[in-house]
Image (cartoon, grey):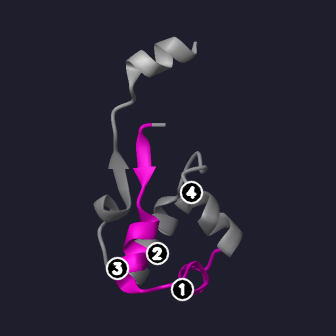
Amino acid sequence: MPIRVDIDVMLARRKMSVGELADRVGITPANLAVLKNGRAKAVRFTTLAALCEALGCQPGDLLRWEAEDTAKDAADA
């Protein structure tokens, strides 16, 4: 998937644990881990807003687009 999640980068910058962030945002650590590890298929804007508020950042600090390697994808098919 070309959308990359950089929550771990912001957690390190803020010296915050996954558990602490999950508590501040109001989601389970397991659900936060799914999002943090890039396995989530979607994120609600309310959750994204809560993450930004808790981390003191912008959505672009947490999410970025990265082009997929089309040559690799074609070889895998």
Instruction: State which region is magenta.
Output: 2-28
Please give the label number shown on residue 37. Answer: 4
Discs 1, 4 touching: Cβ within 8 Å:
no
> Residue 63 at what x, y percent from top left?
38, 55
Q: How many other residues sit within 10 Å of disc 2, few (<14), some (14-19) or many (≥20)?
A: some
**Residue type for callout 2:** Ala
Indicate which disc, 1 or 2, sits on the residue closer to the N terminus.
1
Please give the label number shown on residue 24. Answer: 1
Discs 3, 1 touching: Cβ within 8 Å:
no
> Residue 15 at what x, y percent from top left?
42, 86
Between 76 and 22, the one lying in front of the other is 76
Between 60 and 37, the one lying in front of the other is 37
* Residue at 39 percent of width and 30 percent of height: 68
Residue picked out by circle 3? 13
Task: Report, in whole angstroms, how far the alpha carbon at label 1 lies from the one at label 2.
Answer: 8 Å
Which type of secondary structure does the marked residue at label 3 adopt?
helix
Indicate which disc, 3 or 4, sits on the residue closer to the N terminus.
3
Q: Locate residue 9: give its quadrant.
A: bottom left
* Image quadrant containing the C terminus: top right
Between 75 and 31, the one lying in front of the other is 75
Q: Is residue 18 above or below residue 68?
A: below
Q: Locate residue 6: give its quadrant.
A: bottom left
Task: Report, in whole angstroms, how far the alpha carbon at label 3 lies from the one at label 2.
Answer: 17 Å
Which type of secondary structure does the marked residue at label 1 adopt?
helix
Discs 1, 2 touching: Cβ within 8 Å:
yes
Mark nearer the viewer, 1 or 4: 4
Q: How many other residues sit within 10 Å of disc 4, few (<14), some (14-19) or many (≥20)?
A: some
Indicate which disc, 1 or 4, sits on the residue closer to the N terminus.
1
Residue picked out by circle 2? 50
Which type of secondary structure does the marked residue at label 2 adopt?
helix
